[in-house]
Every structure is written in structure tokens, then in C-alpha cells.
Image (tube, coloured by chain):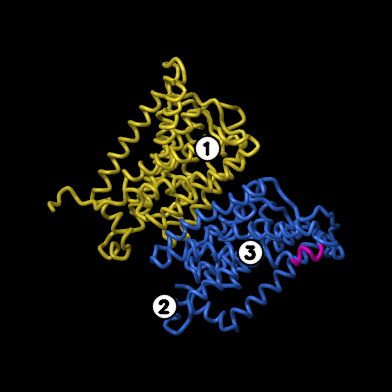
Amino acid sequence: MTGQLGYQVFFAINALILAIAVLGLNLQWGHTGVFNAGVAGFLAIGGYSLAILSGPPDAARFGGFELPFVVGLLGAMAVSALAALMVGLATIRLREDYLAIATFGIATTIQLIALNADALTGGNLGIHGIKRPLADLFDGPFTYNFFYLAVVTVLLVAIYVALETIVRSPWGRVLRAIREDEVAAVSLGKNATRFRLEALVLGSALMGLSGALYVGFIGYVSAADFQPIVTFQIWTMLIVGGSGNNRGAILGTLVVWALWTTTGRLIVELLPSRLHAQGAAVQTILIGLVLVTVLMLRPRGLIGEQPTVSRHTTA
Amino acid sequence: MNAFWQHFADGILTGAIIALGAIGVSLAMSILRFANFAHAELLTFGAYIALIVVTMFGTVGEPIGQLSFGWTLVVAIVPAGIATALLALAIDRVVYGGLRRRNAARMTLIFASFGVGLVVRNAIHMTFGGDPEYYTRELTIAVRLFETIRVMPDQIVVLAVAVVVVVALHLFLRYSAIGLAMRATAENPDLSRINGVDVDRIVGWTWSIAAALAAMAGVFMGLTVQLRPEMGFNLLLSLFAAAILGGNGSLIGAVFGGLLVGLAENLSVMVISAGYRQAVPFVLLVVVLYVRPSGLFGARS
């Protein structure tokens, strides 16, 4: 019984951490129409930043400052935001499909840095032994996970409320105006490039937070956790749930993550171990088919975008 | 200095393979009007189809001269090209065609291609496993050019065939009725349709040519490197970089883009760790897009 419950908690922690990244992507793509194909790269920046700021020291690499976890999280968001700003300044004016390719390239480059810059990232081995926050106060991983779930839940709710508020603000309306018709928005005097850049930076900060929370939870970071497939999963979560709708983003995360973990468990339980590699391929194929099917049959997702109007409007 | 010329020669050879793949990416961008993230999987698919054919014959054939392969592999390129074209056409019919009819946004097509690429790549992984495969384990002796540069006889043949194919395609696009219609569709699909161009037929031709070239690039890569389910995907950034560097839809541009990317990747190992090689096309791409968004050979918009 505790095994099953323990698994549910573990599932929920991972799902809610991912939901934060999906909300970030929703701000970029769903609300503003900025295509970011490098989500895994920003997650990685967040994760490694936490490891460097709050992780244990090691003579062989930079960092390991053992700063408090909260400082690590804030630092992770700041570094991700800064990286997004640099990327954005170079690419945000590009045509949307060029932007897709450019951000995809960023993620590849970050992946290569994670693998090769041993003095910063620990290279192939990654960075281990990152202390979980307040772990001493709990008698074991089972109770600790409940605590971590509570932390992640509070953060997710706070982010959701904040995003709902700002997408309904005048700033949020400009984002959607740019997404719908950039020329019109510009002709009304809005600096489209600036707004797109702001959405990219803010969304990427959330991705960095998500990556840092993940690394904080599992206690180590390695490049294998930030493969291009992660970008794809997060995109699928947003599209399935309903791009442009924050509740849809969270719902999509839960649905797709449930599908992913369930198929993963079935493969381990039902298939002999020599077929596990094939099973993992089936798991990935399934997620690809889900995305393509939703795009073709239900392009708005499970709960599509709702009209958002200012609370000052009486309609 | 010798090291430079060696990397230079390797760069030209890599570049020729990238160019064959990039032509398809470029055609898709200009005529089908979206960045096809699944194009790289067509290379992989073609390479593995040729592997099936070679395995069916049980051999790559008696090696021709100093080459590692014989006529069987040469012949295998034909079914590989046809099968890859059929796969591309089938995917277009099932996925992209439906989206186009619905007037879906360009980004929807890009998402879909992301998903399609994932499905094809993992289907190949499931069928053949993740271990590297080879057409032949025949050893060949490198020949020396200008005393200092060592190249494999296979590489010289690959380069020569790539040149012939590019010239033939250039003539086809320039002088055939279909080539003219393809260029017209790239320019303005609506106007082409009004003037009697069967756009669906042009879409079919575009996929077939792009896929056949991709299959050929895949076979060449399998021959000079190895076959792996990720062989195409790892080349995706190089293909995009080459196509965009050359300028949207320009055949000559894609070829020069391919050579440039191939050279940059190979020469970069002289200055930076080989571990970062895969990022080189991307850096090149960002620099060029920043300075000249229409690419080196594209028309300024």
C-alpha cells in the first residue's frame, strides 16, 4: 500500500515540476506565438545552475558553493532568464521556423556543453550528492517526498495565479495581439520585438525553475536528463492540454505524463528485459502518435483557449 | 599545414553528403513551405532499406577495384530511393496533406514533422536495434592525393556521384516542365494554380526528389561512416544550417551551404574540442542569419 502511495507521490512531484515548464512554454507559444524548440536546454541550464550554486564542492570543477536551496532556485531562474535574453537578442526577429531551428540548435549546444565542459558540469558523470533541502528534518524518503510535493504544489499554484493575472493584464493582451497579428500590434505603437523577448525570458525563467526543482528532488544532474525528447514531451503536453490555456497546460502535463509513465511501467513489467530497448522505442512512438493525432483531430487540445477579457470590461 | 588540408578534404566529402540532404530540406522549405524536422529520418530510412537489400543478397557484391563495395550496393540505392520516396508520399498523404487542406499554420506542420520524425526514428530503432551496422567490413587502403592528403576510394566515388546528381537535378529544375512548375510553385502557389499547375502533383514530385536524395545521402553516410538509428537526426542541424545558409529554395545555395557546413565542422576540430563539433553548424547559422537573414544565395525580401 505504501509502495503504491509512494509511487503516486513520486509521479505527482515529477508531473507538477514538468507543469511549471509547460506553463513557461505556454506563455511563450500559447500566448505570444514565440516558438521555443530548445526547452530541454533551458531546463538543463536551471538544473546545472542549482547544482553549481547549492551542490557540494569539488576541486575538479567550478562551483559547489553550498548556498541555501532557495538561493539556488532563484539563481537557476536568473541564469536561465539571462541565457534566454542572449538567445532572444540574437534570434527573436527571425521568421518563426528559423526561430524553431535556432532554439533547437541552442538546446543541442547546451547538451554538448553539459557533456564536454567537465570543469563546469562534471562532463559525463554529471554532479552528484546535491543535498535535498531540509532533508534532515524527515525520517525517510517516504515522508520527505510528501514535503517536497507540498513545496512543488505551492510553487505551481502561485505561478498559475501569477500567470493568470498577467495574461489578463494589458501586458498579456499585447502578447496575444502580437500572436494574432504582429503588423497590427506594431501599427498601434507596440514594440513587438520587446514583448516577444519579455515572454521568452519570463517563460525560460520558469523552465529554469522547473529544471532546478527536478535536480533538487533527485539530488544529481546529468546531461542524459535533458535530451531532445524532453523538449518534445513538454511540447506534446502543451498541445494535448490546449495551447493558450494555463489550465489546459497543467491538464495536458498530467495526461501525457500519466501516459508516458504507465507505458514505461507496463514495458518493464510485461516485457522480458532483452526487449526493454524496443519497449522504450514503442513508448516514444506512442507519444509521437499522440501529438500528430491531436494536431490532426483536435488542434485546440483537450481544453482549448478561452476568450480572456479584461476584468474592467462589462460584457 | 598538412593537417589543414586533410581536414579540408574531409570537409568537402562530409559537405557533399550534407548537401544532398540539404537540397531536400531547401525544396521542402520553399515549395511545401515548412521546416521539415523529419527530413533527417528519410536519410536514416533510406540507409537501412539499402542495408535490407544488401542483406538479402547476402553481400555488397564483389568489391569493384579498390572500393569496399560492389554492384549490389550500387543497385540497392534504387530500391532505397524508391522506398524512401514512397514513405515520404505516404506520410504526406496521412499527415501533412490533411493539415494543408485545413490551412493549418506553418508551425502546426513543423510540430507534426517533429512527431513524425520521432515515430520513424524509433520505429527504425525498434526494428534494427541501436547497435551500429555496416554494409561491409571489407577493409580498403587510403589513397594519397598531393602526397599528403589521405582519402578512402569510397569517399572519392561518393563525391563524384554527388556532383553528377546535383548537376542533373540542376538541369532538371532549370529546363524540364516539372522543374519550371516547381520553381513557379515556390514563387507563388496561387498564381501557379491559376496558370494550370497541378500543385498536388508538384508536391508529390518535391517529396519524391527530396526523399530520393535523402536516401542517397543516407547510403553514402552508411558507407563512409556507419548506420545507426540516430545517424540522420544527429545531422539535422547541419542540414538546416546548410539549407538556410544557402538561401531558401536555392539548389546551388544548398550545395554551397552543405560544403561550407562540412568544411566548418571538420576544420573546427583544429581549434576547439571535437566534442563541440555538432554545435558548429548552429553557430555558423546564427551568425549568418544575424548578418544576412535571407541566406547567402537567397533573394532579399
Element class at badge 1 = helix
| The quadrant where residue A145 appears | top left
Please state the horizontal and vertical placement of residue B66, each as a whole percent of the image: 86, 63
Q: Which chain is blue?
A: B
Mark 2 or mark 3: name the one nearer the start of the chain: 3
Q: Are marks 3 and 1 in contact (CB under 8 Å)?
A: no
Question: In the image, which disc is placed on residue B190?
Answer: 2
Residue at 52% x, 36% y: name it: A266
Which residue was labeled with disc 1? Answer: A264
Mark 1 and mark 2: Cα distance apart in space: 47 Å
Which amino acid type is shown beneath numbered disc 3? Ala
Residue at 50% x, 47% y: name it: A286
Residue at 58% x, 49% y: name it: B122
Nearer to us in this view, A162 or B94: B94
Is B82 positioned to the left or the right of B103 in the image?
Answer: right
Mark 3 and mark 1: Cα distance apart in space: 32 Å
Nearer to us in this view, B284 or A26: A26
Find the residue positioned furthest to the left.
A314
Which residue was labeled with disc 3? Answer: B83
Element class at badge 2 = helix
Label 1 in the same subunit as label 2: no
Please state the horizontal and vertical placement of residue B287, each as a whole percent of the image: 53, 59
